[in-house]
Amino acid sequence: MTALATFEAETRSCWDVFRDPVGEPDRTPRHTIGEVSAASGLTAHTLRWYERIGLLDPVDRSASGQRRYSDADLHRLAFLGRLRLTGMPVADMLRYVELAREGERTSADRRDLLLAHREAVRQQIADLHATLAVLDHKIDVYNGRLTRCAPSH
Amino acid sequence: MTALATFEAETRSCWDVFRDPVGEPDRTPRHTIGEVSAASGLTAHTLRWYERIGLLDPVDRSASGQRRYSDADLHRLAFLGRLRLTGMPVADMLRYVELAREGERTSADRRDLLLAHREAVRQQIADLHATLAVLDHKIDVYNGRLTRCAPSH
DNA sequence: GGCTTGCCTGGAGTGCGCTCCAAGCCGTTA
DNA sequence: TAACGGCTTGGAGCGCACTCCAGGCAAGCC
């Protein structure tokens, strides 16, 4: 079972690992920056920049100096990508990563950071749902289904 | 009923009108920029800037030249604020407003714009829910409820 | 050998959405 | 009369998150 999991981890494509980052990640460096860019939707520029500012640990290099990302890198990147996509500022992501680097004793701080972000996410969901209702209504009006209650614009 | 509605519209506070912009809006200019700022959460700077770039029609002025927003202004502002809050770029909002100024013949274009934004909103909601699941899981781990399946960071 | 493709670097540049500045006017309160 | 708070303007400035540039290296293929 463990052997199988390891085998699968080693053979999963960059795209697959990024999309579904579960289990113990492999640490062998094998994905090029182009592959990671395609899988993550981040540009190669952005990936290098994330590394430069410390969001990612220094990535392993091939013999000729090119980056080779491991599955573990992809796992972290997938999580950071989710935080970013849901509106966490890069500065906060950086704080989270730096806390993580300090080890076990900062876990309460990290949890609090995630708790705060969870609240922000819930708020965003509420805002989006409220807006969805407004949009549905207006679109109905534009479709001519509701001539009463017409919007002023 | 209409008389009552009109009466109520004239006596509702800036805050109330902004929060619940329903019915035929009154067009008498009566809210100061400070009131609108407090009600909308937008700074006075931003309100003036929105007007300057054409998101809002030129606002009525008091005898001494100060802005006085009508309920109709608040209605538009509330809608624009929702679009903005849910990630529509200012340029797209501007396009919507400019189409609206051209009158009835652009209503199909406006509807399409809102349809596109509705899809974007739905996508955001999906992203947020997916992230919420990840956050819930990680927070559980940090709370020590799940020692198995621990994250790498 | 020559061409193409992909990647490397530090540092400068860009686009967006505000945000602020300086100088001044108006109306109210003391 | 003087101070104060709120408002006015055009234009400059700012913070964020990338995004790109110039110049160069390395590997693969015809």
Image (cartoon, coloured by chain):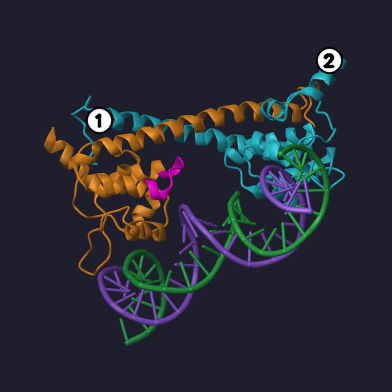
Chain colours: A cyan, B orange, C purple, D green
Q: Is residue B94 above or below residue A4?
A: below
Which quarter of the image is occupied by the C terminus of chain B? top right
Can you tell which quarter of the image residue A40 is in? Answer: top right
Q: Nearer the viewer, mark 1 or mark 2?
A: 2
Label 2 packing within 10 angstroms: few (<14), some (14-19), many (20+): few
Instruction: Residue type at mark 2: give it.
Output: Leu
Measuring from the top left, give residue C9's x and y in whole percent. Answer: 77, 57
**What are the residue bounds of the magenta stretch?**
B84-92
Q: Is residue A66 magenta?
A: no
Residue identifier under label 1 = A141
- Please say whether residue B28 is visible from this viewpoint: yes
Measuring from the top left, give residue B120's x and y in whole percent. Answer: 45, 34
Measuring from the top left, give residue C5's x and y in whole percent. Answer: 68, 43
Whole-number angstrom distance, CA of label 1 to CA of label 2? 56 Å
Secondary element under disc 2, as helix, strand or loop, is helix
> Between A27 and A32, which is closer to the camera in this rendering?
A32
Task: Residue A4: give its label.
Answer: 2
Instruction: Residue type at mark 1: give it.
Output: Val
Secondary element under disc 1, as helix, strand or loop, is helix
- Please say whether residue B13 is visible from this viewpoint: no
Measuring from the top left, give residue B25's x and y in whole percent. Answer: 21, 43
